[in-house]
Amino acid sequence: MKLTILVPANFNFWRTVYSHGWSALKPFSIDRSEHALHRTLELYNGRISSIIISQKSIESLLVVSGQSVNPEERKDIIRQVRSCFRIEEDYTEFYREARKHRKFRWITRAGAGRLLRAPTVFEDMIKMICTTNCSWSLTEVMINNLCQKLGIRSGDNQYTFPTPSAISSCSEKFIRKEIRAGYRAPYILELSRDVADGKLDTEKWRSSDLPTADLYKEIHSVKGVGPYAAANILKLIGRYDYLGIDSWCRKTFFELYKNGRKVNDKVIERFYEPFGKWKGLFFWLDLTKHWHGKKDPF
DNA sequence: GCGTCCAGGTCTACC
DNA sequence: GGTAGACCTGGACGC
């Protein structure tokens, strides 16, 4: 199967793939030799499809799969890919704002700003919890384990991201020891059970009309999701009003603007305050600007 | 190889 | 509202 997905004029495939660490976490993987992003998807009807996404032209993405799919499955693949690459989102206002600042004009020229996300908010939430209080290598271990031990295997030996029900059927001990999530296990389990039972509808957040502050409170109320995680989940929903500062961001900010001298988070927040509702995105792109000149930032 | 220390966000208890 | 300590793991370091 081959299909083409049209993209907006300012779309940049690689800057989206390398926008943050998600493309290095299963079921995403980067194929450097083929210049493509791999992803194993679970379709609406339970069928598993491993796809390879690459930039076909300036105007379109090419999605290839070894399997044949029916028209409805094809629609679902397109829907999921469009959502991961944020193709629906309108960045006109953001680019207009970026053009006003000399140091951020590169953003508009580069077509940067789209942050890669998972097909579901649930997957983004679990991944974000797994980035807290640990090294990136441990995050990779936890996510690999979740996919390999609880996901569904595809024909080409890849795994899907597990469903809320798959995770919620496990014991806390299993998630703690086998997934290696440690003390995060009860948080992962509670979130999965609440989503599986329908007590928490994380997917509605992407289309919510709630003011961002209220949405932040709701996301923050999930156990294991603190200020850093809630702010970064918001960014993947399309709200950039919070910074989501972690130790890497602090260190990078100190090096960029303070000659390595440590400053309070409030100083960082004041620095990006002029960027209003886009400050979280300016903050992230500012700190990762040096990635954008590199072929492979990870 | 083993033990110790530290970094990394979030939660809870306490002031 | 602010702060201390616990949570758990991997990595660095010293022995």
Image (cartoon, coloured by chain):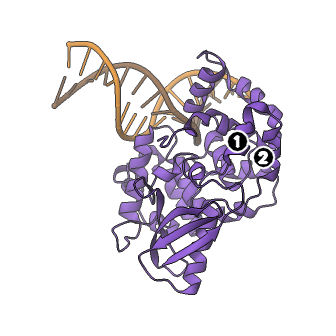
Chain colours: A purple, B brown, C orange
- Asked whether residue A112 is in view, the answer is no
Spot occupied by residue A159 in the image (x, y as percentages of width and height)? 40, 65
User: Any mark on residue A95, and which?
Assistant: 2
| A52 on left or right of A205 | left
Check disc 1 and report the residue beneath it: A107
Residue located 61% across and 15% down the image? A259
Residue A73 disc label: none
Labels 1 and 2 touching (C-beta < 8 A): yes
Mark 1, other Cα within 10 Å: few <14 / some 14–19 / many ≥20: some
Question: In the image shown, does A240 or A53 lie closer to the viewer?
Answer: A53
- Residue A245 or residue A281, whichever sits in front: A281
**Residue that protrudes farthest toward the bottom in the picture:** A70
Q: Secondary structure at mark 2?
A: helix
Residue A10: percent from the left, percent from the top?
71, 54
* Disc 1 secondary structure class: helix
Would you say A229 lies left or right of A29 here? right
